Amino acid sequence: MHACRQSFANRHTPPRRVLWLLPCLLACVPGCRRSETESTSVASWRFAIEESPGSVQHAYATRFKRLIEERSGGRVEVTVYPYGALGTATHTIEQLNLGVLQFAMASPGSLGKFIPETQAFLLHFVLDEDERVNRRALRSPRLLEALDARYREKGLRLLSLFSEGEMAWTTRRLIRRPDDFRGVRMRVMTSPILFAAYAAYGASPIPLPYAETYSALQLRMVDGQVNPVFAIERQKFYEVTDWLIFPGHAHFVTSLAANKQFFDSLSPSDRQMVRDVTEELDAYIFELQQAFANERLADILRACGRRGKTLHLCGDLDGFLASLSAAERRELVQDNPLWSDEPPLTDEERARFRAASRKARTAYLQIGGTHAPEVLELLADEVSRARTAEALDPHPGE
Ligand code: 6CS
């Protein structure tokens, strides 16, 4: 943690980080060079994501690339770097700060080490269970401006916040109450607040990079992990765990960030082009992540069927069941000998998690940065306003 803060402040680059930067710096040289005549020059924008192809972030970045290249009339070329191409999520945040990258997806689970206030999104039972409410809250100009001030301090700009879906636990045992977490080594992203959140439930949290999670589960170095369903499908975490549990405690929020110096030096029309594209993508990604949640759960069940594996489900599956055609319902549920579901956590069971999660809130206020109280209050207020607005008008105008 401390070392990461130092690297941002001092720009002290240990040899390992230089190795990650090398391919990018080399790729950067011709991309940055303008051709002889300004009218034919092509700007090269590099955009790193924290996920692999087939993910929410990949869908976002590929559409961003298409729209920017179209709207710039070929003046701009966007290169998308999927997870792993330039190192871990922590490496790509450092590269964004250095200006080697122009854009990157920066999730609070990784970004929290650099901008601790962003970890408010990692707290449990702060966002609503209804994704439409969260979408309204995350688009709040007040919230975006308050956080952008923190991003600017670190040489970044915040362009957008959005949810990638409801978080689910994949574990080896059923977890219905905090006590069930005792002795469970839970893989978390490398954020001190996530560590505090699972420690508060009685689990033994183990911070690990995304890429190391599957093998850690396989080798039984950890017993569980937490992610949205599409990520569980992409990373095949269901292969190496037995339960898929939807506790209704959190959503995976990410941010689209730009390098500050780069973004502030764009022409007003190019900045507006980026703003228009991110605005359009917000609606696109909202629909897509909802569709992914159901489609990928069906894919997981099919994959388990092929492997003869029972994956026990625990959660409110009404939305998923409603998304299936009659034929899919027969295939995946009625005629599926491997189908196994448990009732969702009761209100009382969830209340136990809610009560335990208060400790992590206290930890956030202590270590979430100077502006943590202001950011948490603002987020809670925006969620509450969004709930009221959603109740009054369930179909916000796009
Ligand atoms: O769990 C993780 O580390 C990752 N999960 C998602 C859904 N996106 C990126 C992040 O690094």
Image (cartoon, helix red, strand yellow):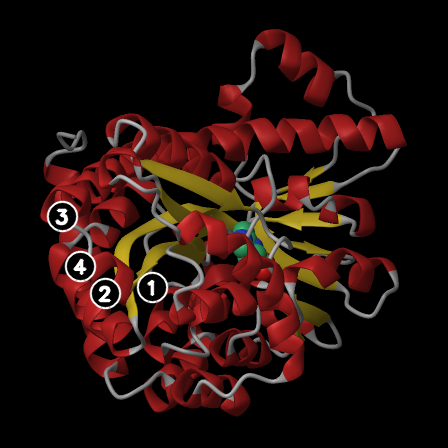
For the image shown, how many numbered marks are present on the structure? 4
Identify the residue at the far top of this view. Answer: 327
Q: How far apart are the two marked residues, 1 and 2, measured between alpha carbons?
A: 8 Å
Between disc 1 and disc 2, whose residue precedes? 1
Earlier along the polypeptide chain: callout 2 or callout 3? 2
Name the one closer to the observer, 150 or 249: 150
Q: Identify the residue under disc 3.
A: 388
Callout 1 secondary element: loop
Q: Which residue is mark 2?
A: 379
User: Which circle's residue, 3 or 1, is located before the other in the chain?
Assistant: 1
Image quadrant, ligand 1: bottom right
Task: From the top left corner, tell me how far across and down residue 27 is, in percent.
Answer: 54, 53
**Mark in the foreground, 2 or 3:** 2
Under mark 2, the amino acid is Leu
Give the image location of residue 225, x and y in percent: 66, 60
**Is the residue 58 above or below the residue 185 in the image?**
above
Residue type at mark 1? Val
Residue at disc 4, CB closer than 8 Å to ligand 1:
no
The earlier-in-sequence mark between 4 and 3 is: 4
How far apart are the two marked residues, 1 and 4, measured between alpha carbons?
Answer: 11 Å
